[in-house]
Amino acid sequence: MELWRLTVHEAHELLKRREISATELTKAVLERISQVDGKVQAFLTVTDELALKMAEDADRRFASGEGITPLTGIPIAIKDNMCTKGVRTTCASKILHNFVPPYDATVVAKLKEAGAVFIGKTNMDEFAMGSSTEFSGFFPTHNPWDLSRVPGGSSGGSAAAVAAGECLAALGSDTGGSIRQPAAFCGVVGLKPTYGRVSRYGLVAFASSLDQIGPMTRDVTDCALLLNAIAGHDPMDSTSIPQPVPDYTQALVADVKGMRIGLPREYFGDGIDLQVAAIVQQAAERLAQAGAELVEVSLPTTEYALAAYYIIAPAEASSNLARYDGVQYGYRAPVADDIVAMYCRTRKEGFGHEVKHRIMLGTYTLSAGYYEAYYLRAARVRTLIRRDFERAFERCDVLLTPTSPVPPFRLGERTDDPLLMKMSDICTIPANMAGLPAISVPCGFLDGLPVGVQFIGKVLDEMTLLRVAFTYEQLSGYRNLLAPIG
């Protein structure tokens, strides 16, 4: 049995029955990483020694029968923009190449408490700014389904690691689609929870009003298990929602009879690859055959979402990234005539092109004379987008759309065309702008490459979202898809 092929819940059953040990499982995953990560390049840091120590601790839990959770002994990867005490956290940026946090992000602390095993930190677009993981400050990650193609971004390392069997699950972050789009490109499940449902404490900020941490797994059951572990109110995060957390595994019921599933017409028109749209439409029809009612709805402000996002997100990034000045931590330019020159040289040498591009955009839109013309107008559009969703949800329980308008594109294909690259997120950005939960699950293949369907839910209604996603997964049979690499 190749243990790295197991899902989280399959591995848990074997661990609980003592048929395998956490140490055996961790060693199998580390061996898998050594075999394939030279091709995929999903990891920035592999924590071999830490992982084996955590696995031994998990085995002691199983031996004593105490402190066992569904994640105990499970090898999990962490996107490298979440602080891990004593383990390098770079955000895939040279400006943080040697930064070792003195504390854990809340989600990391919760996974430790659950007994999970940290296998390593995954590659990403620098500071989560990108849609292909080509903007990492170190190297690009490759899609394990086709090494000549991108895995999506910015959580491309996490998605590729899950799809290649280099971990059983991973955490990603999603500001404009950075969990869902790479999940679609790599044939895995990716969930962006409601804004505030999962603590952002210890997540290195990109755009604070949009960022959200979520699970990336090989099936919907595993997604629910991870969400159970990381969701909940956190007093360390002022945007955290003080609401009790349900048991999300209770949503795993394969039944959508009587449910109303909305199909927004704007998500099946211009800019969407016709073959992708057809595959996603088939997913909708499969749910209709299972008893769901398909309802056409309209989200007219969708066409403005991309433009509004690329005003709001860079503006917040400009503010958040001002802290990287070479003084307290991270990279410092070795030679400078004075402190101002040191600031300038540090940022010039430490930040990559895409990050500098977005900082300049954000600084411009926040500057005197332009704040009202751009930022405030984008904020008003954001309100209109949220109201569109509220009206749509008066007629349906969830929305169904493509996750990405196109299948995985080739490495280098879009790097010279910023607008085309940013169009990769046209289906995912609106949910972030409205703070809504959304999930991508595999729904087919196009020329051997995965295609994902996205379900968008009401605020704090991850239960309905998971139920529809689980039902579709059972109908389609697309689960635990492992890329044929190696």
Image (tube, helix red, strand yellow):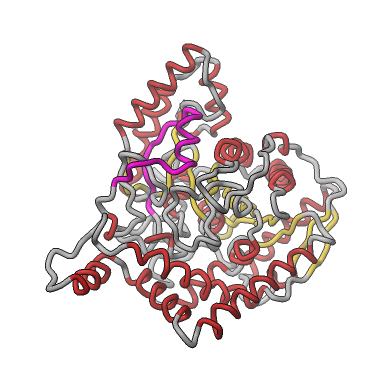
Q: Nearer the viewer, residue 134 or 234?
A: 234
The span picked out in magenta is 100-123
The relative height of residue 18 versus residue 313 in the rendered view (above or below) is above
State the image quarter where residue 250 is shown.
top right
Marks counted in the figure total 0
- The x, y position of residue 398, in whole percent, is 75, 55
Residue placed farthest to the top in the image? 64
Q: Is residue 104 magenta?
A: yes
Q: Is residue 449 visible?
A: no
Q: At x 52% / y 32%, what residue is drawn?
A: 6
Q: Is residue 344 magenta?
A: no
Residue placed farthest to the right in the image? 258
Q: At x 63% / y 66%, what residue is drawn?
A: 430
Q: Answer left or right for 444 relative to 395.
A: left
Q: Is residue 113 visible?
A: yes
Q: Answer left or right for 115 relative to 455.
A: left
